Image (tube, rainbow, N blue to C red):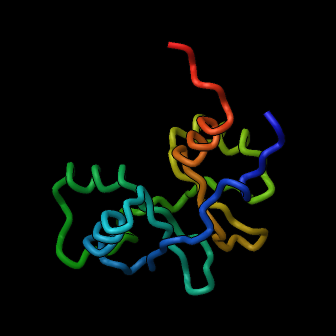
Amino acid sequence: MEDIFVARLMTSELITADPDTFVEDAADTLLENQIGSIIVSGPDGELEGILTNTDFISIVAESKPKAKTTVERYMTTDVITVAAQDHIQTAADKMIEEGISHLPVVDEDGVVIGIITKTDLTAYLSAIEDPTPA
């Protein structure tokens, strides 16, 4: 496989939320945009957390979401990230090792510039690899 870097596969048109966004609004955003995660960022674009569709499963399972609950209550704050210049193998390894499907891409200042997902990696591989024989 040729040297492919995260910047080539990441999505740079991010859908983000503030930490004080209501959980209900974040859920609507995920559904409307058919995405599996929303980046939670501060006023200068710095990464503060991530809220994924898996987090929403936990929210429902706990049956504790209250009206006007913010994403800050449920978001992951110790977010695993990659840099745009990282090799996609690095991203794939982090996803497997950490059991995650979404990796925010940050610049040297910690500002979110994109996201790469297992779907991005799978789509890339399916485009370059020959299908497995039946």
Q: Is residue 73 above or below residue 99?
A: below
Residue 25, x across and y down, in percent: 29, 75
Front-lying residue, 18 or 102: 102
Residue 132, x across and y down, in percent: 57, 19
- Identified at 28% across, 50% down, the residue is 57
As drawn, which residue projects farthest toward the right? 3
Q: Quadrant of residue 130?
A: top right
Q: Quadrant of residue 35?
A: bottom left
Tell me if 8 is positioned left or right of 48 in this view.
right
- Identified at 48% across, 74% down, the residue is 16
Front-lying residue, 24 or 11: 11
Residue 109, x across and y down, in percent: 75, 73
Tell me if 51 is positioned left or right of 101 in this view.
left
Q: Is residue 130 above or below residue 35?
A: above
Q: Quadrant of residue 91?
A: top right
- Identified at 57% across, 57% down, the residue is 79
Residue 113, x across and y down, in percent: 66, 70
- Identified at 72% across, 56% down, the residue is 8
Tell me if 69 is positioned left or right of 18 in this view.
left
Quarter holding the N terminus? Answer: top right
As drawn, which residue projects farthest toward the top? 134
